[in-house]
Amino acid sequence: METIKETCFETLVEKFLGTGFPHHLSGAVSLPDLSPDTQNFILRVLDLMKRSRYSLTGFNPALLRWLSATIPSILPGAWGGRIPPITVQGRHRKLDDYVAGQNFPPDQGQNIFVDIGCGFPPVTTADTAHRFPDWQIYGVDRSFADYVVYETRGHYACFNQEGEFLYFQAFLDFGGRALYADPKGTKNRFNQLFKDLFPLLRNDDTLVSETVEKDGNKLIHHHIKDFETDNLRFIKSDMMDLGPMVAKVIRCMNVFLYFTHDIKKEMLGQIKDHLEDNGFLIIGTNGFGIQSRYAVYQKESDDLSLREFAFSLDNLGHITFIPWLTIHENDPEAMLLAELSGKIRSHPSFWIQCSRHLDQLLEYHGFCKRKTDGFLHFPEEEMLPNDFLEKNSMLWREMQEKGYIKGAVDILGKAGYDAWINSAGDIAVRPPIGALP
């Protein structure tokens, strides 16, 4: 991969995707001002875009803001090498649908579901426990914050046992972008809130949580205990050091992308030992419940068989972010997604019709409008993130109802892939040999 040095962003984009970068978007990304890991990230993004035949006319203000502002604040380098466990409720609903759609053989004992790298707060694991009340659910993570500070608008920051700041998560609907734009000031603010609230704590019982409040801000000690239920428990452990446990389903989302290929293979070997015969392992990446990609393995004869690679239809959209999310060069999942997306976008009649319909829905729902210059233009008043997610869900539900997911599957089938719509309603293929670990 080349180095960026002092290359102009617009020139770099045109090198990968073709000439004609729009004037109204110029200057949105200043490469010299970005950290080296963000610069390398952008190079990986453009390489994947080229492989997936993403059009230059797909570039839009939301994508550029994501590259220039959001990514620098969530890469591990922004957190001292720590993986930020950014999450949201309902993010893995479709993966729960996938599990619910499997015909598991009758079992004498209780079904066990392990969510590795569940993050904190572990809202997605709690969703799964609610969805499968007859299963025993375990959320596993290498670190659960000992203290959580919530400020008045719901933004929160996590602290370790020694009271050291770990990370924060902001809700973009309520001034969150300003917090990400000034991470140092945000850290100082949360540190001050922690110092103000900590003296109010009285209970040191590690088996229960304690909450104290002042001026609308609150501090919770042992917050993880608030999420445990009759069928949900949490284990603080590194994936490689997980004790004796055998599960029917293991899920590990937004974790593997942070590791190199060799470490991924080693991790797969470790996880395999915690799966029962015919058990499932789901590994992948998604955003806030959108733009998901994942591989499904099944344990057979003490080995892992790669059953399918699947991705949601919205990975083909114009306003996409997660298809380009990688930490290492040549990420196998992202490369395979780019290859499959490229096959679909290469089908002229299907893609022209799909893109035209998508443009109409984007305009109808108030996202943006494609103007005579061929590029997407957004309204001056920005859509709030919750509205974005709600309308985005409606948009892609309409696209699916119009048969575009079936059309994509048909195209992949004609291109030589064994393709189908899986039990989560996503596009699935039998991965080519060697494409994934």
Image (spheres, rainbow, N blue to C red):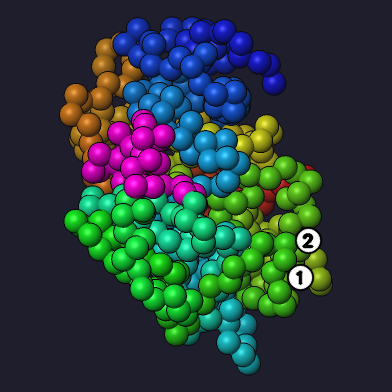
Residue 140 badge: none
Measured from the top left, where is residue 400 in percent x and y? 37, 48
- Residue 266 vs 114, above or below: the answer is above
Who's the residue at 30% across and 34% down the image? Answer: 178
Q: Is residue 187 magenta?
A: yes
Measured from the top left, where is residue 163 in percent x and y? 47, 56
Residue 273 badge: 1
- Residue 213 vs 42, above or below: the answer is below
| Magenta portion: prevailing SS class | helix
Q: Quadrant of residue 435?
A: top right
Q: Is residue 363 magenta?
A: no
Quick check: 325 left or right of 190? right
Residue at the limit of the structure toward the bottom, as seen here: 108
Specify the segment rendered in magenta. Answer: 165-192
Measured from the top left, where is residue 388 in percent x and y? 28, 42
* Res 388 visible: no
Q: Nearer the viewer, residue 172 or 326?
A: 172
Residues at badges 2 and 1 in contact (C-beta under 8 Å)?
yes
**Residue type beneath disc 2:** Gly
Q: Which residue is mark 2?
A: 269
* Res 244 visible: yes
Who's the residue at 66% across and 62% down the image? Answer: 238
Quick check: 214 left or right of 103? left
Measured from the top left, where is residue 99 in percent x and y? 52, 69
Q: Nearer the viewer, residue 224 or 211?
A: 211
- Residue 376 vs 161, above or below: the answer is above
- The answer for how far apart the CA atoms under marks 2 and 1 are is 7 Å
